[in-house]
Amino acid sequence: MIVMPGDKTLNAILVRHGETEANKDGIAQGQTDTPLTGEGVASTLRKAAKLARFAFSAIYSSDLQRAVTTAELLKKAIGFSKPVSLSSDLREIDFGALSGKSREEIMPIVRHHKADPSLRYPGGEGGADLIARTERFFAEARVRHVGESILVVTHYGVMETVAKRFAGFPPDEPVVIGSDDVWLLELGDGGARFETAL
C-alpha cells in the first residue's frame, strides 16, 4: 500500500542511523564517526522493510558517515533510484571537547545543557543550535516537498528535537528511540502529526 500525504502536507519518515562501534561501546560521538556494527546493518535492513509502503520523492541524510552509510543501505534495499541528498542541518549535536568520552561520564553535563539550550559545549554547539538547524531543515523541506513523502536519516539529537518541538514530548523527559524504530512526522497547515510506531 502506498501512503500519500495530503496536498499541503509533508510526510517526513525519520530513521536513526544504525548502531555504530561507539554506540556499542557507550561513547558519545557527536559529530565524530565510527563504522556501523553488524547489528547496525541488520537493524537498518529491518527498518527498510517498514518503508515499503511509502512512495518517496527524496531521501535526505545527515552528512556524517554513519548516517550516509545507513541511507545508502536503505536506498538500495527499497530500490530508490535518485541520489541521497546530504544536509549538515541533520547532523548530531557537536559535543566539542566532550566528543569521544563515555556517555555515562558526560550525562550529568548533557542533562544540564538540555535544561538550558543556550549553554554551549566547550568547542561545540548548544541545544539552541541543534533546534535551529532541525527547524530550518523541516521548514525548507516542507516548502520543497509539500504534498510528498521524504525519508530522513539522522541522529538521536535531531529525532529527540523533532519529538519535543513538533510532537509535544515533555522537554524534561528522555525520548526513547528503538533500534528498529521508524517515525512519521506530518507537517501541514494545521500543525504537526507524529507517530512513532510504524
Image: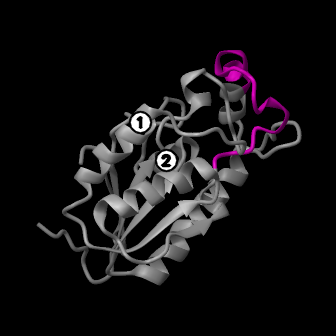
Residue 144 horizontal/vertical position (percent) = 48, 83
CA separation, marks 1 and 2? Answer: 8 Å
Q: How far from the left and from the top, in percent, is residue 126?
A: 75, 44
- Residue 177: which disc? 1
- Up-down relation of residue 135 to residue 173 (above or below): below
* Element class at badge 1: loop
Residue nearest the viewer, comparing 50 with 13 = 50
Q: Nearer the viewer, residue 171 or 106?
A: 106
The spot of residue 163 in percent (x, y) is 45, 47
Q: Nearer the viewer, residue 27 or 170?
A: 27
Q: Magenta residues, as a range?
A: 92-109
- Residue 176 in sight here: no
Can residue 108 be seen at all in this image of the molecule?
Answer: yes
Decide whether residue 98 is among the magenta residues.
yes
Q: Residue at x 51, y 67 (%)?
A: 138
Q: Residue at left 87%, top 36%?
A: 122
Q: Residue at x 50, y 66 (%)?
A: 60
Label 2 SS: helix
Residue 52, placed above or below residue 95: below
Q: From this viewpoint, which residue is outermost toward the right?
A: 123
Q: Residue at x 38, y 81 (%)?
A: 146
Residue 19 is situated, as x and y percent measured from the top left of the image, at: 49, 35
Q: Quadrant of the N terminus?
A: bottom left
Question: Splitting the image into 4 quarters, where does residue 186 fall?
Answer: bottom left
Q: Is residue 130 left or right of residue 188?
A: right
Image-based side of 191 in relation to 4, left or right = right
Q: Which residue is mark 2?
A: 159
User: How packed is label 2: few (under 14 Cα within 10 Å), some, or many (20 or more)?
Assistant: many
Q: Label 1: few (<14), some or many (≥20) within 10 Å? A: some
In the rendered image of this protein, does residue 182 appear above or below residue 99?
A: below
Extreme left residue here? 1
